[in-house]
Amino acid sequence: MTPAPMVHALSSNSRRELRFLVCGSVDDGKSTLFPADRFLEVHVDAPIEICRQRDLKGLYRASDSGKVTNVTGRDQPYEPPMAAHITVKTAEILPETAVELLLETVSTRL
């Protein structure tokens, strides 16, 4: 089975199209993967410095040495979501707090 492509590897135009396919309005006559009330976009926000600190696979180090290219936030621009339902600022809160925030948000949509 072929894995699904990573969204961060898509062009910004393709990301917009993918976001529409996933959570676009069902009223416009175009098909979507999920009805609008069944989709929750979560933006996990971390500064590049924090991403580098948490980089267990050494992706940023490999990018710095030229072994890896097209790394989001380094070679490729990072584009935050246009309309995330919730943003989790991982540099500012504990993981347990982030989980509580997500659970609270999801539970209000059930």
Image (cartoon, rainbow, N blue to C red):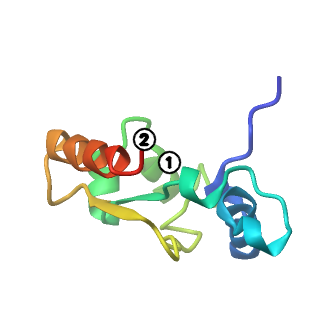
- Residue at (30, 65) in percent of width and height: 47
Residue type, label 2: Gly
51 up-or-down from 110: above or below: below
Q: Provide residue 65's location: percent of width, then percent of height.
A: 50, 54
Could you tell whether 19 is left or right of 79 in the image? right
95 up-or-down from 76: above or below: above
Residue type, label 1: Ala
- Residue at (33, 50) in percent of width and height: 108
Residue 85 figure quarter: bottom left
Q: Provide residue 20's location: percent of width, then percent of height.
A: 71, 67
Q: Provide residue 30's location: percent of width, then percent of height.
A: 85, 66
Q: Nearer the viewer, residue 8 or 29?
A: 29
- Residue at (66, 48) in percent of width and height: 6
Q: Provide residue 74's location: percent of width, then percent of height.
A: 49, 67
Q: Nearer the viewer, residue 60 or 67?
A: 60
- Residue at (69, 56) in percent of width and height: 22
Q: Nearer the viewer, residue 8 or 66?
A: 8
Tag 1 secondary structure: helix
Q: Badges 2 and 1: C-beta atoms under 8 Å apart? A: yes
Tell me the number on the disc at residue 58.
2
Tell me the number on the disc at residue 62.
1
Tag 2 secondary structure: loop
Residue 32 figure quarter: bottom right
